[in-house]
Image: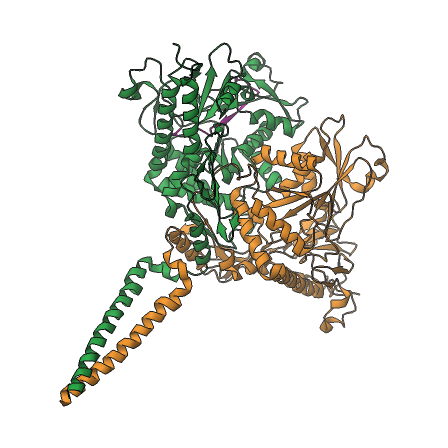
Chain colours: A green, B orange
Amino acid sequence: MARKFQSSKFYGVCLLVSVALNLYFFINLHLIRGKWNNYDQLSWSQKAAAEAEAVAAVSCSGHGRAYLDGLFVDGKPSCECNSCFGGPDCSQFSPDCVADADGGDPLFLEPFWMQHAASSALVVAGWHRMSYVFENNSYISHELEKHIRKLHSIAKNAATSGKYIVFGAGSTQLLNAAVYALSPQNSSSPAKVVASIPYYPIYETQTGFFNSVNFEFEGDASLWKNSTSDSSINVIEFVTAPNNPDGKLNKPTLQGPSVKTIHDLAYFWPHFTAIPAPADEDLMIFTISKLTGHAGSRFGWAVVKDEAVYQRIVWYMTLSEMGVSRDAQLRALKLLKVVLEEGEGNEIFEFAYQTMRKRWERLSWVISMSNRFSIQEIPPQFCTFFQKVRGPSPEIPVRILHISKQLYLWNAAYAWLKCEWEEDKDCSAVLRGANILSRNGSMFAAGNRYVRLSLIRTDDDFEFLLHRMNNLVSDKDGSKTM
Amino acid sequence: MARKFQSSKFYGVCLLVSVALNLYFFINLHLIRGKWNNYDQLSWSQKAAAEAEAVAAVSCSGHGRAYLDGLFVDGKPSCECNSCFGGPDCSQFSPDCVADADGGDPLFLEPFWMQHAASSALVVAGWHRMSYVFENNSYISHELEKHIRKLHSIAKNAATSGKYIVFGAGSTQLLNAAVYALSPQNSSSPAKVVASIPYYPIYETQTGFFNSVNFEFEGDASLWKNSTSDSSINVIEFVTAPNNPDGKLNKPTLQGPSVKTIHDLAYFWPHFTAIPAPADEDLMIFTISKLTGHAGSRFGWAVVKDEAVYQRIVWYMTLSEMGVSRDAQLRALKLLKVVLEEGEGNEIFEFAYQTMRKRWERLSWVISMSNRFSIQEIPPQFCTFFQKVRGPSPEIPVRILHISKQLYLWNAAYAWLKCEWEEDKDCSAVLRGANILSRNGSMFAAGNRYVRLSLIRTDDDFEFLLHRMNNLVSDKDGSKTM
């Protein structure tokens, strides 16, 4: 009987343990896993999700990242390091490397997207949009177009109502498409394509390369001021606001019956400039590169008033590539959704603005230590997006007020630097001597005394630039001699 | 004691049930869920995965599909229906609608990708490839290039060793890039761009639209046979194999010191033609559209022998759009991985070949009922990929051997149909009268007696075409009068 009792007690204990185990399994299976909710039922997307997360989980010491389409070594994704870093996990620093302030790679926005990993992730099914056309027989996602219009109304930077929208592979392609669309077809003389100095070099190289019978590049817009009353001379002016390289809100130089204008508004977003009012021009070009930082996606759009011009840009896009990749359009849609959903644009614009602002504050500080360099002046203006004046005077931090020299507290994408010393005739060579890679002013038709410094690259690139500039102005040749 | 015994028995039963439950939970948690393995730990990709799977799960009655970037009604993705179907779930059939055999939308491959949902799914992180350039400072994914080379060696359709590869937004863009690259820069007269009739219309419209000082379209290649000894006349010949529209493996018409050739090999894959030997030409253009069916991704590539020509195409891609969208490149890489992994290409080529073959068999049968129409002849050839002769004679199914008329058992992408009756001068009008949309032969510079019928569209489109063709040849005017 004692054995029976013991056995009964034994069963009891076992039962208790078993019930406890059941409870554990139940909680684990239905409550903890249950938080994934319908994710439990996910099937075909899981393998790809695991792949992407494994790549994202690779540690590159904060100085690089691994990509799904990068090199895999022994089945493991490998790091692609920022400039000046190397080694398998990007932890090896090369102190003597060049500080790269050359290209306009907008990677200052990368941290924003890493912080918004879940909302910006995208799953593409193998059979997504295989057709040449969308349902309305066009090359353009109607949903994406709707989001673009909404974005402009929120950013208050463009009036799109009553205008057409057409997509291109970045603003690069649309610049050329616009030139084709605005050039007269059967004129005996080609349209003159012009821009204000300093101007974005692509205007010239692109027009030259395509070498059309319909147009030719003529450089400085101001030289054509007296010719615009002659209606037989067709002129196409690029007006860039904010201007690349100097960040100024350019206005058209030319007006007249045969003058057409292409407004390149790639940088006309609240993080790079005050937005005084929505742009309301006949032909405006935007790009996602300088909005969300996704230069690699090659996605831009034109907002066009005139139907015939719009149709010619559509025709250009058809004949050059049958519309923008649906994959790029899908990606752009996802990114714009995040921009619109996170504080109605406030979050990304604030993030980007603050990043630019801090970079300018620090660069200003360094430049102000010497009279060797000067930087462009941008007048303060009221920004309708941030609802305050954006410019130098009202925002100089107290702690640097004791510096007598003007500080350059803009948020422009580039510093347009001038070498002020008589002997520094080749400014980019001066910087190269200090191990800084800049873009020569002569590329912008502005001469060698100027260089463009890119301030929108990775944090690493900016830190090296600052460090090298600091060395440059601190050494005996560059030190303050005011 | 009896009670004790009973209680012990009760415990025993409870324990048994509990242990069974434990077992159930254990299996469920660690074996069934366990197969997801590390998927359990997925985090940021889950929301996007759930979104994509919800869209894919929308039922469109097999006559349409929903897309992630399609219209959402009341928060639910809506169906986009195949031609002739409508309603919220694409179940409403419009019996009088037009059978569309016009465009070359390669949706016959859509079912293949739906069958390979898991391996072809792609997860894109928000910060994927934001930069303008890849690590090697180029616009081209090295991994993708490697996969393309491997694909050609498996499909046995092109020799890529010792040649350069450059990407474009579909073959469309590369055709134009190649014309620019091969045109002399400083010649007093533009290069003459020619092709064999019938030719793909884009060659002419594209060259005309871009209207470069460097080249002009001159049409029929054969007219220039006597001029090619004159080295001052630069000629660029498009050689299309298989030809669009007629599927023939064209060879160059012209040869000479100033003749350059662009080999448009968009359809040179085992599912559209016998592959007699790998193409080994100086400039060959391919596209993913006609390989995997992803026309919407706008991705193509050129295989180029000469470095200077390659560099000029790279320069064209730089100035026109700074390289192909990284999103399109990532997608192409994923798709090519599936092609290569699933039976080393055998699976997709076999699927596509069988689909085309069956379509040709059925169309042949219908056309053979009448002498009103004839279809192009394609001589049988040995295919090195499938390791057998591909062409009409050896493969006529026994059940249709009693038909005296030649059957057209190719696998070309298009039927190149000729209206044989004297009165049917406008063949596309004849078909339009029977509610069939075809592409007029005059668009291919071949006159109105010819039309191109697309056989690579959806199953629905093909079924309607067949049905309407059947009606056409069965009515009193179209019936057999041989």
Against A57, is A221 above or below?
above
* Secondary structure mostly seen in the magenta stretch: loop
Position of B250 with respect to A314 (left or right) is right
Against B28, is B40 above or below?
above
**Number of numbered markers:** 0
The image quarter containing residue B311 is: top right
Q: Residue at x 27, y 64 (%)?
A: A27
Against B127, is B100 above or below?
below
Q: Nearer the viewer, residue A231 or B28?
A: B28
Q: Nearer the viewer, residue A455 or A15?
A: A15
Position of A249 with respect to B299 (left or right) is left
User: Where residue A186 sits: x, y (%)?
Assistant: 66, 27
| A364 in magenta | no
Q: Could one spot residue B96 in this view of the protein? A: no
User: Where residue A239 sits: x, y (%)?
Assistant: 50, 23
In the rendered image, which quarter contains the N terminus of chain A? bottom left
User: Where residue A11 sits: x, y (%)?
Assistant: 21, 80
In the rendered image, which quarter contains the C terminus of chain A? top left
Q: Residue at x 30, y 73 (%)?
A: B22
Q: Nearer the viewer, residue B97 or A441?
A: A441
Q: Could one spot residue B272 in this view of the protein? A: yes
User: Where residue B455 sits: x, y (%)?
Assistant: 65, 57
| A268 in magenta | yes
* Residue stretch rendered in magenta on the structure: A254-271
Position of A404 with respect to A88 (left or right) is left
